Amino acid sequence: MTARRGRGYWLAKSEPFKYSWEQFVADGSTYWDGVRNYTARNNLQAMKKGDLVLYYHSNEGKEVVGVARVTKEAYPDPTTDDDRWVVVDLKPVKPLKVFVTLAQIKGDPALAEMALVKQSRLSVGPVEEGAFEHILELGGTRVR
C-alpha cells in the first residue's frame, strides 16, 4: 500500500431530523457515530486529519448543505461496545451558499461516478477532488 498524498475528500450523510447542519454548527464539532456498514466504516478509517467532507442531508432535502473538516482520525465508536465500529471527529467549515440537490448531482455528467450516485445507500463515501470542487462551484462556495 502506498502512502496517500494530499488531502482526501468525502461525503457524509445525515438525516436532518436526527442531526442537521444547523445543529452541527451550533455544536461546533461532533464525532461521526452510528455507522454500521463495513464499507462506510472503512471509509471512516481512511479519513485523515484535515480531509474535507461534504455534509449531505438525506431523506429530507436530499442536498449537500455544507463542508466539514476531519479533526481527529478514526477511534472506537463510544456509542457501542463492539470494537468493529469507529468514529472520526468533524467540525463545520462553511455552509454552501446554494444547496446542491441530489437531482442536480444525478443530472450532471461530471458527477455521475460519485459514490452518492453509484452506491446511494452508503452513508460515508469518497469523493474525487474534481467532483468535490465541482459541487463547491455549483454551491457558490470556496473552501481553502
Image: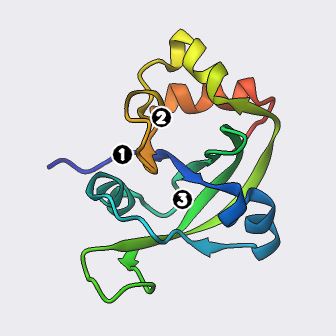
> Local crowd at mark 2 within 10 Å, few (<14), some, or many (≥20)?
many
Residue visible at 73% across and 66% down? 24
Tag shown at residue 5: 1
What's the residue type where badge 3 is placed?
A: Gly
Mark 3 or 2: in front is 2
Q: Amino acid at mark 2?
A: Leu
Quarter of the picture containing the C terminus is: top right
Q: Which mark is residue 67?
A: none
Picture coordinates of residue 7 (x, y %)?
47, 47
Q: Nearer the viewer, residue 34 or 29?
A: 34
Assess disc 3: are there few (<14), some (14-19) or many (≥20) residues with their C-alpha within 10 Å of its C-alpha. some
- Given this view, does label 2 or label 1 mark the residue nearer the observer? 2
**Residue 98, percent from left and from top:** 83, 32
Label drawn at residue 116: 2
Residue designated by label 3: 50
Secondary structure under tag 1 reads loop
Please name the residue shown 46% across and 28% down the image: 117
- Determine whether the residue tagged by mark 2 lies in a helix, strand or loop: helix
Task: Give whichever of discs 2 and 1 has the lower sequence position.
Answer: 1
Mark nearer the N terminus (3 vs 2):
3
